[in-house]
Image: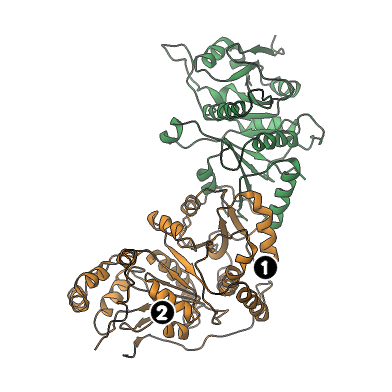
Amino acid sequence: MPSPLLFHPGFSSTWRRSSRSSSGRGWRSTSNTRWLMKQSLSVLDRPSPLSRYLSVRTRRDRVNPSRDCGGGGSEHHAHLHLTAAIQSDPACWCIIVLFFCVCFQALEAVNAQLRELYPESEELFDVVLITNNHANVGLRLINTINHYQLFIERFCMTGGNSPIGYLKAYHTNLYLSADPDKVHEALEAGIAAATMFTPDKMTEVSETQLRVAFDGDAVLFSDESEQIYKAHGLDKFFEHEKAHENRPLDHGPLKGFLEVLGKLQKKFYAKGRRMDCPIRTYLVTARSAASSGTRALKTLRSWGLEIDEALFLAGAPKGPMLEKIRPHIFFDDQMFHVEGAAEMGTVACHVPYGIAQRAARKGGKDKETSPVVK
Amino acid sequence: MDNMVSVVLNTDVKQKDADSAVVVAVTSRALFEQGPEDDETGVWKLSRAFPLLQAVQKVNDCLLEKNPAESLLLDVILITTDSQHQQLSSVLISSTRHHGLGVGKFFFSSEETFIDCLLENNVQLFLSTSKDEVLMASQKGVPSALLEARKNDSSVQCQREDLRVWLHEDLISPCDSASQPSSRHSPQRFLAQLGEIRQRFGVSDSPLWISLVILHGGRENCGNRLKALRSLGVSVDDVYCLAGAPSDPLLSLLQPHFRFNCSFVN
C-alpha cells in the first residue's frame, strides 16, 4: 500500500479544545454531547440514510427581533445553507440531533468570532430547519427542538411542497438531505447538495474550528476526468491529466460552497487571523500529487479559490486520513468512500453527481477506487 | 345624495346566506383598471383583484361540490371608495356582469362613507390596493388587508389558483385596538370562519391554503401563534419562522393573494 503523498502547506496537527467563547448563547457541554451520543446509539443499531436533512445557513441578517426586515433580501451573496428536515418520529431525532450538536458548536465558534471582528456585518452561519411536514405537527416540531435544546431559530414546514423553491428563493449554497431524491432535485436546480450519512460512532471534532473536507472529481470539479478513467483506464487518465495540466477542469456541484467558505475565511485573514482561522478546508482526493494532482491545484488557483490542505492519496483509502483530519463534514461522489469515512467516524455526505452514479446504478459495485499506483 | 350609500344586488349571481357567509369586500379600484372603457364592449379591463376573485370562486365551487347545501361560503361584494367610482355605477355593474365575476352585491359609497358601509353590512374582510384605505378601515375595526401584486406568470394565470392566505404578525402597523373578542367585525371571527372553511377539506385537496409566517422572534413566539390560531380553529398548512430574515423571497415564492395581520390574536 503506497503511503499517501501529503501536500499540506502550513498543516497544524493540533486543534484547540478551548474555553467556550463569550457569545452568551449557552453552550452545550461536552458531557451533554456524550449523553446524546449514548442516546442515539441505544436507539439505532447501525447508520442508515436518514430521511431528514440538516440545514445551516449563513445569512445577511443577524437575529434581531426588533428589526424590521420587510424589504430587500435579494443580495445574499455569502449564503451557505445546509438544510435539515426532521421527521416527526422522535426516535429518528437522535442521530440528527447528534450531528447537529457536533457541527453546531463549531459553527457558533465561527459566528462568535465573526461578530467580534465585524460587529456590523451580517454574514454569519445560521441554522434553518426545513421539513416537508404539514404545519399540523408544528407544535410537535417546536417541542422536539426545545427538548433537545437545539439552537434553531429559523425553521420552515412546507406543508408537503418541495423545499427546493424555498432554497432557491433564499439563494442556498448547500443543501444536505438524507433523502436522495431531494438531493437530486436540488442538484438539478443548480443547488449544491449532498445526501447525509451519519457514522456508527462519532469521532470527536473540534468545537472551535469548522473543518470541511471535499473530494475533488465530481464534487469540486466536474466528472470529466473520471469519465476518461472509466472509459480508458488509469494510464490514459494520467496521460490526459498531464496533457491538460494547464486547462482548468470544469466546476463541480460543490464549488460554490467552497467559494462561500473561502469568502468567510478571507474575512478572518483580513483581520490577521490566518494561522488560527476558525474555518479550515481540505481536499481529499484519490489523485496523486506526482501526476494528476497538479491539474487539480491549478484549477483551484484559476478559480481564485484556496484550500487549506490538499491530500493526494493516490488511491489509498480515505478513511484513515479523515480520521486524522477530523472534519465535521466530508463530501464525496462515491459511496465506497462515503461508507469508508462513516466507518471511521466521520460524518460523510454523498454527492450523487457524475459518472460514478451511472456505474453504481448499473448494478456493478464500484471497486475501482483503490488503483494500485506503482 | 353624497352621503347615501346605495346597495345593488347582482342578479346574475345567486345570493348567499347573509348569516353564514363570510362577506369579503373588494374595492372597485382594485378590480378594474384605471382608464377608459374598452371601446368595443364599453367595459373596464380587469386588474389586480381578479385572481383573488377566481380563487374565491374556486373555493366556493369546491365547498358546494362537497355539500350542495353549504352555507359557509365566501361572499364577495364590490365597494366603491371614492365619489368618482360611486357615480359610475352602471359601468361597474356592466363590467362585472360582462366578465362573469361572482360578485354578489355592489356598495356604492364614497371616501367618507365607505367605512361606515363596511361596518353596517357585516363585512368580515376588506381588501384594497390602497394602503391608506386598509389602514383607515383597520383602525375603525374592520379586518383589512392589502391585495398582493401577482407575478406575471402566464402559466399560473391560465388555471384557477387556490386561495392563498398569508398570516403574519405585523407589529409595525397599528392594529385595530377597538376590536372586542365578541365584536362582529373582529379579526378573530374572520380567522375562525376561514379556519372552518379549511376544515371542510383534507390535508392535500384543499383549494384554500393558509401559511403562517413569523417574521420576528423565535420558535417560542411561533409556538404561541400556532396555539392561538389553533384555539380559534385555524389549522395552518405551512409555517415559516424567519427570525429576522427578509420576507420578500418567501413572498415571491408563496404568492399569497393577501397578507393578514393576526398579531392581536392572543
Quickly name the residue at label 1: A148
The part of the image, by quadrant, that contains residue B108 is top right
Q: Which is nearer the eye, A168 or A226?
A: A226
Q: Residues within 10 Å of mark 1 (few under 14, many from 20)?
A: some
Residue at screen point 34% across, 73% down: A216
Q: Say whether residue A330 is left or right of residue B9.
A: left
Q: Amino acid at mark 1?
A: Tyr
Q: Total label count? A: 2
* Same-chain check, marks 1 and 2: yes
Report whether residue B210 is seen. yes
Q: Residues within 10 Å of mark 2 (few under 14, many from 20)?
A: some
- Please state the horizontal and vertical placement of residue A291, each as a whole percent of the image: 24, 82
Callout 1–callout 2 Cβ contact below 8 Å: no
Chain coloured green in the rendered structure: B
Residue B207: percent from the left, percent from the top? 57, 35
Between A30 and A207, the residue placed more toward the observer is A30
Q: Residue furthest front?
A: A363
Identified by mark 2, the residue type is: Asp
Element type at marker 2?
A: loop
Q: Residue at x 58, y 52 (%)?
A: A133
Residue B218 can be seen in this image? no
